Image: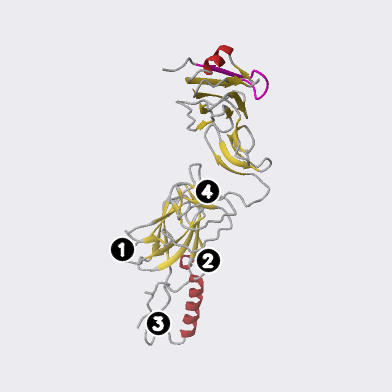
Amino acid sequence: MASTYVNDLRLNELGTGDGSGTWGTTTNTNLELIGEALGFGTEAITTNANTHTSTVADGSTDQARAMYIKYTGALDSNCTITIAPNTNSRVHIIENATTDSGASGPYSIIISQGSGANVTIPNGDTKVVYLDGAGTGAAVVDAFASLNVVDLKVQDDLTVTDDVAIGGALTVTGLVTANANLTLGGTTPTLTIGDAGAEDAKLVFDGNAQDFYVGLDDSTDDLVIGKGSTVGTTPALSIDENILVTVNDDVTVVGRAIGSTITAENDATYDLATANNFTTTTAGSVTMTFTNKAAGQSGSIKFVNGGNHTVSAHADVAINADILTALSATGTYFVTYYVTAASGNNTILVGATAILT
């Protein structure tokens, strides 16, 4: 009975009574080929070929038998590589190490076995694939097309070309490049940038004509939004550790800027750090006073004199004497103010309507 090579490694299977006197040699060769199948092989593609066939030889050494196959050669187009025979059922790690023979590449290699599905490996990439060995309709499948990993540790750059859903913690010590969407899942998903070190941390938005950043300026402990890619360069808005907000240039409001807080100050002492707009209903004589002023601040007051109570003004307030007299009469008035300076006499300009009916 003649030898056959029908196994996935194409080893010599001696028939009954076959190989007299050479049994040991055949067995040793088979063992060597098993070792080869677990190893690394390099196969060159003919220059500028757009098709290539890797056929695992029967019973003899062959680079295509290796578990890890590195394809080299110079290409001027994508190349389809057919791994034969189409009855082999194997797992391969395949690297595309080809080069560009012109100036339009680099190019992908397309791994095929039959008329079924194939797998494309971009230049410079490595994929784990399996051949289903189904004959003329054989397919090649990307073994890690949907990979579920409990703990993944990446010690160098990680490039993602499709959506990533992360349901747990992700710790990265290198560069992460995502060419698709990045979704953080979980009950309270959190993205932490920085490791509590004495250094800036930032998100940079890389635009075509202009970059912007949102970052922590460690030197000032401020959260900064600005133009460019360096924290502290051309800041537009800063928030310090006391939650005080600084805007570094003009503010343009499209629509209305509305303060929703209306504070009751019945003693006519108005703390401008708490609100812009107030209500006052007097129960006795009052002195109109403004505290914690900021230049440029303005607002309004619904002023109700409950019973001919005398109204006077602090020295900081610039108000017409006739208006003070009018406000001292029972009635309801609409009062406005504008702060010209944070301190000083006559720095708060106050006006009022006549009594409202």
Label 3 vs label 1, nearer the camera: 1
In the image shown, does 154 or 224 lie closer to the viewer? 224
- Kindly identify the residue that appears in the image at 53 percent across and 18 percent down: 327
Mark 4 — residue? 177
Q: CA distance from mark 4 to mark 3?
A: 53 Å
Label 3 vs label 2, nearer the camera: 2
Q: Earlier in the sequence, mark 2 or mark 1?
A: 2
User: What secondary structure is the magenta-colored segment mainly?
Assistant: loop
Q: CA distance from mark 4 to mark 1?
A: 39 Å
Residue 10 is left or right of residue 296, and the answer is left
The picture places residue 286, in percent across and down from the top left corner, at: 58, 24
| Label 3 Cα crowd, 10 Å radius (few <14 / some 14-19 / many 20+) | some
**Residue type (three-letter) at the residue carrying disc 4:** Thr
**Residue type (three-letter) at the residue carrying disc 3:** Leu
Residue 14's mark? 3
**Residue type (three-letter) at the residue carrying disc 2:** Phe
| Label 4 Cα crowd, 10 Å radius (few <14 / some 14-19 / many 20+) | few
Q: Quadrant of residue 293?
A: top right
The image quadrant where one finds the N terminus is bottom left
Vertical placement of residue 298 versus 60, above or below: above
Which segment did they paint magenta? 340-352
Q: CA distance from mark 3 to mark 2?
A: 27 Å
Q: CA distance from mark 2 to mark 1?
A: 27 Å
Asked if residue 108 lies in the magenta stretch, the reply is no
In the image shown, does 274 or 230 lie closer to the viewer? 274
Q: Secondary structure at mark 4?
A: strand
Residue 136's mark? 1
